[in-house]
Structure formats: C-alpha cells, structure tokens
Amino acid sequence: MKKSRTPYKHDLTQDIPVNGLAKKSPEFIVPPGLRDYIPLFEAHYDTAGKMPIMVVGATGVGKSLFLHLFEKLFKEKNNSAKVVKTNCANLGGGDPNMARSELFGHKSGAFTGANQDNPGLLEIADGGALVLDEIGELPPDAQSMLLTFIETGKYRRVGDPTERSASVTIIGATNNEIKLNAPFRERFYIFCIPPLHQRRCDVLYYLWWLHLKQSRN
C-alpha cells in the first residue's frame, strides 16, 4: 500500500516537510500561487520515473524550491542516496572544454594542465542524482554528450576512449529554453512554473515576507 504524504506546510515559521521528512529550510518559502504546484510536482516526479526532469521558469519564479523538493523526494525513495548539485553557468569558468571535463571527467594529458585522471560529476553522482541548475548554460557539445548518456547510460571522459557507464537520475532547471538543443530538451520531462505576472498575489506575499524577515533581524 502506498503511504500517504505529509502535506506541504506554507507557514514561513514552520519547517518544510515532504513525504514526512522535515528539515529547517528558511531560504525556501511557498507563496500562495505555488501551493497547488507542490502536489503537482510530486505527481510529476512519480510519473517521470528514471526519465530526467527539467524545471522551466523565468528568473525568480521559484525553480530552486522545486529542485529542493526533488532532492527530498529522491532521497526518501532511494534510501538517502547521494545528490550532487552544480550550477552549469559556473562549469569550467566559461570554457566549453573545461565544462565537459567537469561534467564527464578527463584523462591525464587530455589538455594542458590535465596532470592526472579526474572523475566528472556524472561519475561522482553514480548511484544517485545530479542536479543541473541553469542547464541552459551548458555548451552545445556538452548537451550532445549528456544526451548520449541519457539515452544509453554510457559516457567517456575527455581524452579517454574507454566507455564508462553510470546510473544517475538527472534534473535540470533553466530560465532560457532557447539555448537548449531541441533533441536534448525533448528527452526531459518538463515541469513549467508560471511567471509572477500570472501570480500577482505572490508579489505582495514576497514583500510581506521580506518585511517579516527584516523585522526579525
């Protein structure tokens, strides 16, 4: 029998429980306009299974909240398996080659400064999940390599012909879908967050929360 889930609390003074788990998360708030999206995301997560998920929405709409929720759900369902997180805008310091290296790893001698073999984030996350914030900032060739991994479960370190395998559940978030290669985007199970102009009551809620936060400091 499937166990029932503890409702998501929306009081800013409360913990944020997901499926019975609760930890202090003062950086995450759930405004009225997103309350109904919490159970929708849980259903989205259940339906996706091993399919990668992508959270899409403009800057400031609450994507981080759903990445946080994903982590809670994933750890609950997978005996607290590891979750590796990164911001793709920072991978490689803007160098596409280094971005590939950080994501897939590299072989010693693959490029100048590669003095030893290094695992990438995929290898580190093997058996767990990889959270890719700002996934739209991945260079096109890195998107292609990640697409191959999503489809086959196989990848190669930069400069290494050896094919490797890993089991990794992937979730990404982006505010710029236009930067994503169409075949890459289509492999994700998309979860869209409505913009603030469709949730005008939330603007007042955020202002109230900021006022409350400042009054407590």
Image (spheres, rainbow, N blue to C red):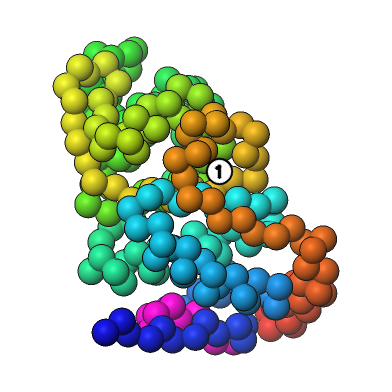
Task: Say whether residue 16 is visible.
Answer: yes
Q: Find residue 147 and report its horizontal and vertical position in percent.
A: 39, 32
Does 18 sit left or right of 14 as displayed? left
Q: Residues within 10 Å of mark 1 (few under 14, many from 20)?
A: many
Q: Nearer the viewer, residue 152 or 17?
A: 152
Does 108 sit left or right of 22 as displayed? left
Q: Quadrant of residue 196?
A: bottom right
On screen, residue 14 above or below 139: below
Does 152 sit left or right of 56 as displayed? left
Residue where numbered disc 1 is placed: 134
Task: Say whether residue 15 is visible.
Answer: no
Q: Quadrant of residue 20?
A: bottom left
Residue 16 in the magenta stretch? The answer is yes
- Residue in the image at 74% along x and 58% along y: 195
On screen, residue 64 above or below 125: below
On screen, residue 182 above or below 206: above
Q: Find residue 55 and report its horizontal and vertical position in percent.
A: 55, 53
Residue 190 in the magenta stretch? The answer is no
On screen, residue 83 above or below 175: below
Does 199 sit left or right of 110 as displayed? right
Type of amino acid under label 1 = Glu
- Residue in the image at 51% along x and 26% along y: 139
| Quadrant (top left, top right, bottom left, bottom right) of the N terminus | bottom left
- Residue in the image at 44% along x and 86% along y: 6
Magenta-highlighted residues: 13-23
Q: Find residue 121 and report its horizontal and vertical position in percent.
A: 32, 40
Exactly how many numbered labels are in the figure? 1
Q: Secondary structure at mark 1?
A: loop
- Residue in the image at 64% along x and 59% along y: 193
